[in-house]
Amino acid sequence: MPLQWKIVIDSTDPHAQADFWAAALGYAVEDNSVLIEQLLGAGAVPPALVTEHHGRPSWRGAAAARHPDDPYDELSGAGLGRRLLFNQVPEPKTGKNRVHLDLHVGAEQRADEVARLEGLGARMVRAVDEPGGSWVLMQDPEGNEFCVA
């Protein structure tokens, strides 16, 4: 049986990262407010673990973006399919990623997509054109590398 998985990315601002990647990929930012409100009401979690984001209660140290067509748990709001989870860490990113995302848009759409992603807060690092292919190396707002191919 296949395993469920998600990509977890350390982040200093998980909500900003979830917003960026949701916009970049056409995903939805997860809404965990139903579960959070139940847990707060029952006294099961302290208010210090919660913040407000997009006008609703959200986990202070975590946020996620999920594919809008994939299933999700209606109580927790957590995606059960393609999902990026951003966990808050105190330190900024240092060094090169060991894993990165490749966004496939095609050569004819690449320049427009790079411009769109820059408008969302990404930064172009360099364009690569070599015998094996061509792509643009970019960084998200926290410096995580990704490619647009």
Image (tube, grey):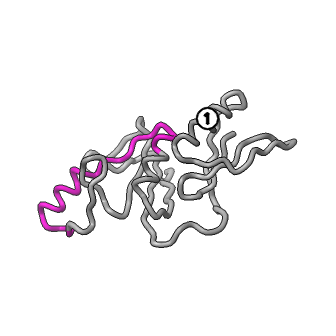
The C terminus, quarter of image: top right
Q: Is residue 144 above or below residue 55?
A: below
Q: Quadrant of residue 130?
A: top right
Residue placed at 49% from the left, 64% from the top? 10
Residue placed at 21% from the left, 50% from the top? 34
Identity of the residue furthest to the bottom in this view = 90
Q: Position of residue 33 (x, y in %)?
A: 24, 51
Find numbered disc 1 in the image and state the secondary structure of the residue it sits on.
helix
What's the residue type where badge 1 is placed? Glu
Residue placed at 36% from the left, 64% from the top? 61
Q: Position of residue 16 (x, y in %)?
A: 43, 53
Residue 113 in the figure: left or right of residue 78: right
Q: Is residue 50 above or below residue 23?
A: below
Give the magenta range: 22-46
Residue placed at 61% from the left, 36% from the top? 115
Give the camera-side residue of 105 and 118. 118
Which residue in the structure is indicated by mark 1? 113
Indicate yes or no whether the magenta region holds residue 34.
Answer: yes
Q: Quadrant of residue 85?
A: bottom left
Q: Position of residue 78 (x, y in %)?
A: 35, 50
Q: Is residue 93 above or below residue 86?
A: below
Give the camera-side residue of 80 and 44. 44
Q: Position of residue 44 (x, y in %)?
A: 18, 68
